[in-house]
Amino acid sequence: MTAKKVVLLACGSFNPPTNMHLRMFEVARDHLQKLGFEVLLGLVSPVHDGYGKKDLVSSTHRIAMLRLALQNTDWIKLSDWEVCQEGHSRTAVVLKYHQNLINSIINNKLNDNINEQDAPWFLNVLQDSCRNVQSIQVKLLCGADLLESFGTPGLWADEDIESIVGNHGLVVITRENANPQQFIYMSDVLTKYISNILIVNEWIKHDLSSTKIRRALRRQESIKYLTPDKVIDYITRHELFGWTNNKQS
Ligand SMILES: Nc1ncnc2c1ncn2[C@@H]1O[C@H](COP(=O)(O)OP(=O)(O)OP(=O)(O)O)[C@@H](O)[C@H]1O
Ligand SMILES: NC(=O)c1ccc[n+]([C@@H]2O[C@H](COP(=O)(O)O)[C@@H](O)[C@H]2O)c1
Ligand SMILES: [Zn+2]
């Protein structure tokens, strides 16, 4: 039997990227491979500046930090499509865009649907992997807190949740203080599509978040070993997140 081919797409602020963002991909790929999937590619899609979250630094900085963070991986790539749009894109739309693009490559119909100039980075990466492949599914990779945000009133449209779990599928990494199994049990739509939701236990727990890194930087505390050294160099060089190079003693 041939393995089902999957692309894992992670949406988020990445403000800044952390080692856990990278770990999330590795843990998910190991698990999916054991279940018989073949993970062709990981994609990181940082949110548009228009998302307007508190303390969000510009996408220019977030993209630059992600590029540095991804230097030591050969299978996780950056997608800058979302940040290049006019405003914030709903996650269902981001997934659909990437799924359509991949389908177009597989079916050799790229020019019918998508302008090649829209996605030069992606074509280089994917065109080889897509050769002789019948189908590839783009799944949303997320932490359990993002899954639980589906329950925040007014944050996600019902049809978007249905499209995400029904058409694409979710790979959820467990996170401190979250209980994804119970959350799924409490939701009719998630229970309906339960076969499309894979929960991956992160046994090597590290309760790391961008919020904690930003807090440390604001307090002029070390963030070494929480994010790659090159990301730390970038943050300190640009004095992001309240870090200052001219400390008063
Ligand atoms: N420690 C972690 N364990 C599991 N998933 C994580 C972890 N950190 C981040 N993620 C996941 O990574 C994705 C991107 O998240 P995001 O950019 O919000 O990072 P974050 O560390 O949660 O940042 P913030 O503290 O600013 O919310 C989300 O799906 C989130 O759930
Ligand atoms: N309705 C939606 O599609 C919707 C709602 C809230 C968050 N999101 C996405 O989830 C991610 C959340 O990131 P944060 O946890 O950093 O806020 C972002 O990529 C954002 O675009 C999507
Ligand atoms: Zn978060």
Image (cartoon, helix red, strand yellow):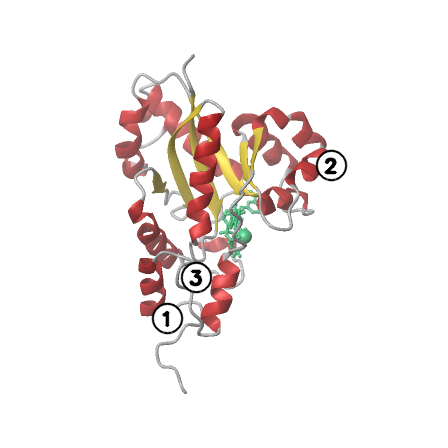
The residue depicted at 47 percent of the width and 72 percent of the height is 218
Of helix, strand and loop, which one carries label 1? loop
The residue depicted at 58 percent of the width and 47 percent of the height is 175
Counting residues from the start of the chain, the first of labels 1 and 3 encountered is 3
* CA distance separating discs 1 and 2: 44 Å
Residue 125, x across and y down, in percent: 29, 33
Q: Amino acid at mark 2?
A: Met
Q: Dot 3 surroundings within 10 Å: few (below 14), some, or many (20 or more)?
A: some
Instruction: Find out whether the residues at labels 1 and 3 contact each other: C-beta distance under 8 Å.
Output: no
Residue 246, x across and y down, in percent: 35, 81
Counting residues from the start of the chain, the first of labels 1 and 2 encountered is 2
Kindly identify which numbered label has been placed on residue 3.
none
Q: Is residue 9 above or below residue 84?
A: above
The residue that disc 1 covers is: 239
Q: Dot 1 surroundings within 10 Å: few (below 14), some, or many (20 or more)?
A: some
The residue that disc 3 covers is: 57
The residue that disc 2 covers is: 186
